[in-house]
Image (tube, rainbow, N blue to C red):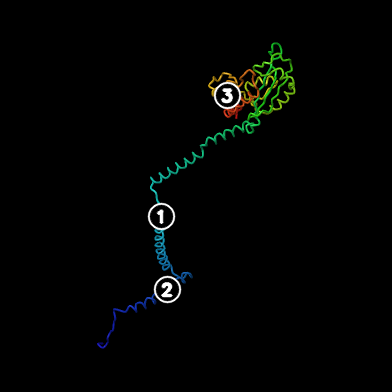
Amino acid sequence: MSGIMLNLDFNGSSHDRRQMKPAGNAKHKRFVKRRRNLERRGLLNKKQNTNNFHKEGHRNNHWHKQNKREDDSKAGAVFPKFSSAQCELSMKSSHSVQAETDKKSIVPSCSTSCKESTSALQRVVPSLRNPQKYIALDCEMVGTGPKGHCSELARCSIVTYDGDVIYDKFIKPVNLVTDYRTRWSGIRKHDLYKATPFKQAQREILKILSGKVVVGHDVRNDFKVLHYSHPEYLTRDTSRMPLLNQKAGLPEDRTASLKILTKLLFNKDIQVGKKGHSSVEDAIATMELYKLVELEWERTVASKSGH
């Protein structure tokens, strides 16, 4: 027994250990490969499969937790967390910006509101779409009959919205003239020698007035000598517009003359001198008065018509 000798090397070289590891690794790989093959065939018993499931589950949970920490770190960089106070402040700021935007989009400029007003009025009064539908009328009368008490047409002038003259004729009355009223009418005896007969002039004038918005000062007297009645909704009488009186600083219930309104509102003198009135000058002045309060006037007409 004493002759037996044991030669044990407990230090072992690192070279031997390095050689063992590959063998062990190869054996483990073969085991794993064999186990997976058995799992696919369904030959692995329940206990082994359960243990494997727990192990795999543990590894999966560990992987998910690690990924979750990485995702959270990434999400925090993109979507920073806000405190409730910061969130509320952000919402208030957002609402205030939105309110400012809405306010700017809702509140129109002066030019926009004027355009909208004109557009609305154009829908109510079709003639507003075309200024050619507006005309101003003025007539001059002479006296016929005993002491010239009866008024008859002796001159008629019609101008456009822009003040252009489209009709201006002397008209011969049906009856004998007994008073030319030159001081006011500007008509003299020689003006009527080759004047247009009343019936012919009447047809020409009414053809122009048809379908038009007729502007005039105390225009009912002009219609009377024409033996004509114009639709009220197409008539604009500047002697019966309270807003003109307001602008001129006159009582609303006062019927102001064309001469006074033109002087007060435009500082312009008309109907001066001893030659009498000019129906062209009066028609132009009447149209200018109308244009001064056009929008307000048409708005009143629209409200009365129920629109």
Checking the image for residue 85, the label placed there is none
Name the one closer to the observer, 122 or 181. 181
Secondary structure at numbered mark 3: loop
Residue 207, quarter of the rendered image: top right
Q: Residue at x 29, y 78 (%)?
A: 11
Identity, as a three-letter code, of the amino acid under mark 1: Ala
Residue 29 circle label: 2
Relative to 81, say whether 157 is above or below. above
Task: Label 1: state its secondary structure.
Answer: helix
Instruction: Using the numbered discs, state the Cα–Cα distance from disc 3 to disc 1 in whole angstroms.
Output: 77 Å
| Callout 2 crowding tier (Cα within 10 Å): few <14, some 14–19, many ≥20 | few
| Upstream in sequence: badge 2 or badge 1 | 2
Residue type indicated by callout 3: Lys
Q: Nearer the viewer, mark 3 or mark 2?
A: 3
Label 3 with label 1: CB-CB less than 8 Å: no
Q: Where is residue 168 shown, x and y percent of the image?
A: 69, 25
Is residue 2 found left or right of 167 in the rendered image?
Answer: left
Give the residue at mark 3.
268
In the displayed structure image, the side of residue 213 where residue 199 appears, left or right:
right
* Amino acid residing under circle 2: Lys
Distance from the alpha carbon under mark 3 to that under mark 2 = 115 Å
Mark closer to the observer (3, 1): 3
For residue 77, which numbered disc appears in the image? 1
Q: Is residue 220 left or right of residue 264?
A: right
Q: Earlier in the sequence, mark 3 or mark 2?
A: 2
Residue 99 at what x, y percent from top left?
47, 40
